[in-house]
Image (cartoon, rainbow, N blue to C red):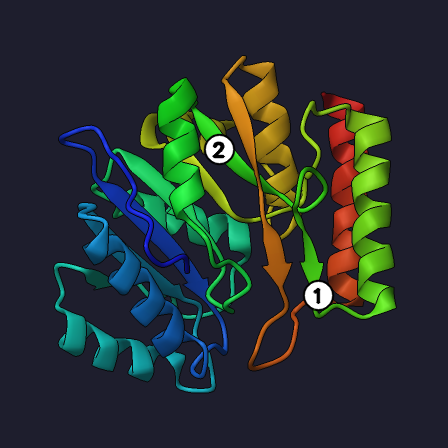
Amino acid sequence: MASGERAERPRGDRYSVLLPTYNERENLPLIIWLLTKYLDQSGIDYEIIVIDDGSPDGTLDVAKQLEQIYGSDKILLRPREKKLGLGTAYIHGMQHATGNFILIMDADLSHHVIHAYYRKQKEGNYDLVSGTRYRGDGGVYGWDLRRKLISRGANFVTQVLLRPGVSDLTGSFRLYRKEVLQKLVERCVSKGYVFQMEMIVRARQLNYTIAEVPITFVDRMYGVSKLGGNEIVSFLKGLLYLFATT
């Protein structure tokens, strides 16, 4: 999280941060602390919505303790009984969001800087601001060669097949106008990691304005990545579906 930088915001704006979690008990206290520290210092009106999908490691218990520490006006718990997919987690969280802007991000400490999103949105009054690891000074830190090749390969294939007009289609750090996010999820049919791709594709179809912010993606400090063989297969199936239907 950046320090010493204050985000300017139009009066009356409220930001809802959606944090889907699954086995993030070690990461959640730190990401909540970083978020609240930055948002409070910036004078931003906000709420953080934690959507835990039945984590067996006790993530929800940790979230309940954080709710007591920071207050239920800042930390909202909206858990689900089991793991139902990243896309549906965002939809579930959005249904409880009271902000007119929604920031979606991971709870694994991979996403750190948020001030640039607010500044970029205000500069161009954009409908969607998305992070990119492949433009400007963006990049990835902490990945092994295999994950870098998978990420680069997935992004290259999506660029060739879908021509989305953005440099990073698979990232999950984005700022939306709430009404735009609502319209997009109504049209999206994908779940899991493919959800992020489809959101950008649908946004282009609907002529929403999109801006990108270079980010450095830092690999998780605790826990293990949830990217496995099943996710890769689902990604390829989803990509072919989008290519055939868009």
Query: Disc 2 or 1, which lies upstream in sequence?
Result: 2
**Residue 57: x, y in percent?**
46, 87
Q: Which quadrant of the structure image shows residue 176?
A: top left
The quarter of the image holding the N terminus is bottom left
As measured in the structure, the alpha-carbon distance from the residue carrying label 2 to the one carrying label 1 is 24 Å
| Residue at the image point whose x is 53% and y is 27% from the top | 211
Residue 181 visible in the snapshot: no
Residue 221 or 38: which is nearer the viewer? 38
In the structure shown, which secondary structural element does the residue marked by tag 1 occupy?
loop
Give the residue type at disc 2.
Val
In the structure shown, which secondary structural element does the residue marked by tag 2 occupy?
strand
Residue 50 lies left or right of residue 206; in this view the side is left
Residues marked 2 and 1 touching at CB (< 8 Å): no
Q: Which quadrant of the structure image shows residue 246?
A: top right
| Residue at the image point whose x is 37% and y is 53% from the top | 18
| Residue that label 2 marks | 129
Other-residue count near label 1 (Cα within 10 Å), few / some / many at <14 / 14–19 / ≥20: few
Give the residue type at disc 1.
Leu
| Residue at the image point whose x is 59% and y is 36% from the top | 189
Residue 122 vs 113, above or below: the answer is above
Residue 71 lies left or right of residue 240; in this view the side is left
| Residue at the image point whose x is 30% and y is 83% from the top | 61
| Residue that label 1 marks | 227
**Residue 78: x, y in percent?**
29, 61
Residue 87 vs 200, above or below: the answer is below
Q: Mark 2 or 1, which is nearer the eye? A: 2
